[in-house]
Image (tube, grey):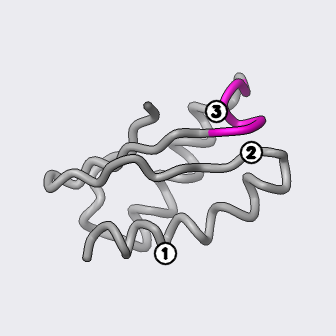
Amino acid sequence: MLRKRVEEALEKVRPSLQADGGDVQLVEVGADGVVKVKLTGACGGCPMSQMTLKMGIEKILKLNVPDVSRVESV
């Protein structure tokens, strides 16, 4: 259930990432609310990827899925 809600929230972020040649792949959703994602494409090697992760992806996920405690890149 939590994983499905996280996937739905990621769909809101995905178009912005894809517009810049990148994407995000959901790796794991822990019972503790920690979401692990993999940034791919242009996002994978971008120097701004940590800002994208925290200020973009994590912000949207927490807004849409309050059970998310943090987002980590793997």
Q: Earlier in the sequence, mark 1 or mark 3?
A: 1
Q: Residues within 10 Å of mark 3 (few under 14, many from 20)?
A: some
Main SS of the magenta segment?
Answer: loop
Q: Is residue 42 above or below residue 4?
A: above
**Residue, disc 1:** 8
Q: Amino acid at mark 2?
A: Gly
Distance between the Cα atoms at labels 3 and 2? 10 Å
Question: Which quadrant holds residue 63?
Answer: bottom left
As drawn, the label of residue 49 is 3
Identity of the amino acid at label 1?
Glu
Point out residue 19 in the picture as x, y percentages from the top left corner.
Answer: 84, 56
Residue at horizontal 77 percent and vertical 35 percent from the top: 42
Q: Quadrant of residue 68?
A: bottom left
- Quadrant housing the C terminus: top left
Question: Does the magenta segment cover residue 61?
Answer: no
| Circle 2 crowding by C-alpha within 10 Å: few under 14, some 14–19, many from 20 | some
